Image: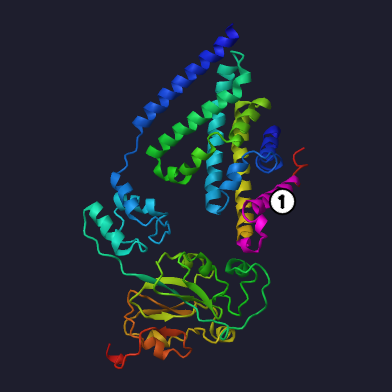
Amino acid sequence: MESYIYPIVIFIVMGVVFGVLLTVLSKVFAVKTDPRTEQITEALPGANCGACGFAGCADYADAIVTKGAPMNACLPGGAGAASEIGKIMGAEVTAAEKKLPVIHCSGDCDAMQQKFTFDGVQTCASAKRFYGGTGACMHGCLGLGDCASVCPEGCITIKNGLAAFCTEQCISCGKCAKVCPNGLIELRSIKKKVDVRCSSKDVGAAAVKACKNSCIACGKCVKICKFGAIEIKDAHAVIDYDKCVSCGMCAKECPRGCIVNLRKPVVKAETI
Amino acid sequence: MNTMIGIIIAAVLTNNFVLSKFYGCCPFLGVSKKIDSSIGMGAAVIFVMICASLVTYPIYYFILKPFDLTYLRTVAFILVIAVFVQLLEIVIKKLMPPLYKTLGVYLPLITTNCAVLGVTIMNIDENYTFAQSMVNAAFSGIGFALAMVIFSGVRSRVDDADSETPEMFRGIPATLVAAAIVSMSFLGFGGLGQ
């Protein structure tokens, strides 16, 4: 008889003790959550794209409530989501300006020689692992379209071996920037019009040999810029978009033509 | 001392929990997509294995054995481990938010995992002392983490090749084949520590 009673009694006791323990501790150690977190999560698009710099929409909502993160960081949501969040938090919010991706490379099939034919898996990531890619320049666009396949709006195409972006459908999620194995893609404000289209870390002659459109770090753009917005980093010019006013002087000066001015030609360019 | 080294080598290499005993295949396949998450999962497994051994050892020797209930150890261990991990989760969430952020999401996944239950029952079956049980638990967890990290590296390359994989092998089948090959490589440790 005992052999039946003991297990039953012991397991009932254990069950009750554990149950009480769990209930008490979950009350004692309860973590308070703000109801606004949930409301904000619902106001966000729910794409979990990570463009705001947080791990997902829920994480961003939590950061707004608990850490006072900026309320206009959601780029796909744009002005709509920003004003919605403003209502929930009881604050005025101005939408962040739209950002667009730009590629810091102009090494298309005409400009850059191919070192070899790559017969492996046709993705940039695997080509990069195989001797740094097929291009003569190790730092340029691999042209196999990892950015195009990751784009949720399908608005990236590979034209002549170089990624090309559309401007209208882009939701500024920044996935293309994250996936590029060479880190060539950057999101910059839609108002800025002048970009350096090269990220070559090769110096001088090596860069010229690898690609017709390469930056050779001559520093002419640095000298001409009145705003101190350009500097040479890793053997190529880099524009600081916070200082740049998109005057386009550097694009005119560049002997290699790797700085492009997307602004429509204005007659009195010098007066700007 | 000699046996301790034997336990460590067996737990990490020769009798690796995932790759030789095939315990805990579910988290092994589920959370190995990225190296970051596999490291988090590995750390959580080490943590839970140590904690589980810590609580089940006294339960077995001070409650189940005196009452001749050792045949009920599986049920008792599952209950105790589940409760204890739940408790830890609640406490960590309140007291150590950074730790909860790194381990928290993985804890519920492995509360009643067979690898965790396996290590506690192995401690009993092999008649380990308390110190030996703790070492066995810690290094079994490290073996699990090692397997996870190695496999997530392999898997990232398999996933890169997804578009080239024949359609019927895409996704989980290709992953299982890769897991089998990684497991075969661990057969090479077979003669070690004997």
Q: Would residue A180 be visible to someone looking at this image?
A: no
Q: Is residue B175 covered in magenta?
A: yes
Q: Would residue B44 be visible to someone looking at this image?
A: yes
Q: Is residue B104 left or right of residue A242?
A: right
What residue sits right under mark 1 in the picture? B181
Residue placed most toward the observer, A43 or B56: A43
Residue at the front extreme, as displayed: B168
- Residue in the image at 29% along x and 54% along y: A68
* The N terminus of chain A: image quadrant: top right
Q: Is residue B135 above or below residue A199?
A: above
Q: Is residue B124 above or below residue A151?
A: above
Residue A246 in the image: state x and y as whole percent: 34, 82
Q: Is residue A261 left or right of residue A64?
A: right
Q: Is residue A38 left or right of residue B149?
A: left
Residue placed most toward the observer, B13 or A118: A118
Residue A187 in the image: state x and y as whole percent: 41, 70
Residue B117 in the image: state x and y as whole percent: 60, 31
Q: Which residues are magenta?
A: B160-187
* Mark 1 chain: B
Q: Is residue A106 above or below residue A86?
A: below
- Residue in the image at 68% along x and 44% along y: B19
